[in-house]
Image (cartoon, helix red, strand yellow):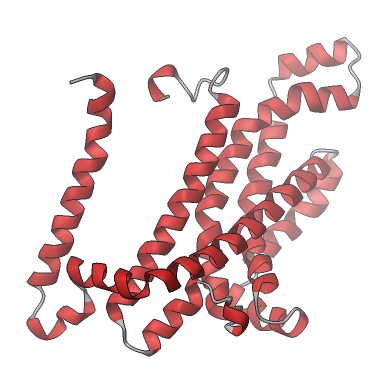
């Protein structure tokens, strides 16, 4: 068996153990409480009955996740460039960025409904608020984490500020930026699901997974509720895999965190 194949076996083995443990836990519960933790056949049945609705809702949640995620990435890069422009700017703005992260979503949600209304725009804004902070923190740290010897060399050569930023700081910041992207990719579907639960809309067939979870919970459809959770997890895995693939494409040829053995 090749080493590459051996490296791929543990995840599949762990998945098999997880599924076996899931089924065993269902049967280990008292008969009167097994409805709280559906068996794998019950979960499969929920997917058969509600698969089309869950797929449609996942599409709406995915679009909101990507919208908030992309907006956070763009704004974070701009904010990071502003923060590294001077120490004074950084000291003045950074506390307010931290304060923005600490605003509770459950309080922001009714305000957004008043200003924007329920639906996709509010969901995108909440997703943006949740994913923005790790992106700006990591990108700023990367732009500042430049080897002092390289920085001195650029300044000895009288490099322009834009050359220092584009040719030295930006490449040094890329690994930090992608670390922030991975964190944001994990948070984006969670943010979109939470936001959909709080500020989502059911009009026009635009319900996301958060609304579906709310409906299934109200109707006491437990297997369907678990199926919604599985779809939400799959959405998160897909976004993280997309970011990881992009990071590998950009970094694997020159950054030490992507050694040939990891590719």
Quarter of the C terminus within the rendering: top left
Residue at 31% in and 83% down: 221
Q: List x then y, in percent, for residue 258.
A: 48, 24
- The quarter of the displayed image where residue 162 is located: top right
Quarter of the N terminus within the rendering: top left
Out of 66 and 167, give the one closest to the viewer: 66
Q: List x then y, in percent, for residue 76.
A: 72, 49
Residue at 74% in and 27% down: 169
- The quarter of the displayed image where residue 164 is located: top right
Up-down relation of residue 24 to residue 117 (above or below): above
Up-down relation of residue 6 to residue 246 (above or below): above
Q: List x then y, in percent, for residue 64.
A: 61, 63
- Along the horizontal axis of the image, is 170 left or right of 227? right
Q: How many marks?
A: 0
Up-down relation of residue 116 to residue 185 (above or below): below
Out of 1 and 171, give the one closest to the viewer: 1
Q: List x then y, in percent, for residue 15.
A: 23, 48
Residue at 61% in and 84% down: 203
Residue at 25% in and 20% down: 3
Up-down relation of residue 12 to residue 99 (above or below): above
């Amino acid at each position: 068996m090749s080493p590459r194949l051996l490296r791929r076996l543990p995840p599949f083995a762990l998945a098999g153990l997880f599924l076996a443990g899931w089924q065993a836990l269902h049967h280990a519960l008292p008969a009167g409480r097994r409805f709280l933790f559906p068996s794998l056949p019950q979960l499969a049945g929920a997917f058969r009955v509600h698969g089309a609705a869950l797929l449609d809702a996942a599409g709406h949640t995915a679009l909101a996740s990507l919208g908030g995620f992309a907006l956070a990435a763009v704004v974070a890069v701009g904010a990071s460039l502003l923060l590294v422009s001077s120490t004074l700017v950084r000291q003045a703005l950074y506390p307010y960025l931290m304060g923005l992260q600490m605003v509770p979503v459950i309080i922001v949600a009714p305000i957004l409904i008043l200003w924007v209304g329920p639906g996709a725009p509010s969901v995108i804004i909440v997703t943006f608020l949740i994913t923005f902070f790790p992106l700006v923190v990591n990108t700023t740290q990367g732009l500042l984490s430049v080897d002092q010897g390289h920085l001195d060399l650029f300044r000895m050569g009288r490099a322009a500020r834009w050359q220092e930023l584009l040719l030295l700081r930006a490449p040094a910041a890329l690994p930090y930026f992608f670390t922030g992207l991975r964190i944001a990719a994990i948070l984006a579907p969670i943010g979109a699901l939470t936001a959909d639960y709080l500020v989502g809309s059911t009009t026009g067939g635009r319900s996301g997974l958060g609304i579906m979870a709310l409906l299934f919970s109200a109707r006491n459809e437990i297997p369907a509720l678990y199926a919604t959770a599985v779809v939400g997890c799959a959405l998160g895995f897909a976004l993280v895999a997309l970011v990881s693939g992009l990071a590998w494409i950009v970094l694997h040829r020159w950054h030490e965190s992507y050694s040939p053995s990891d590719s």
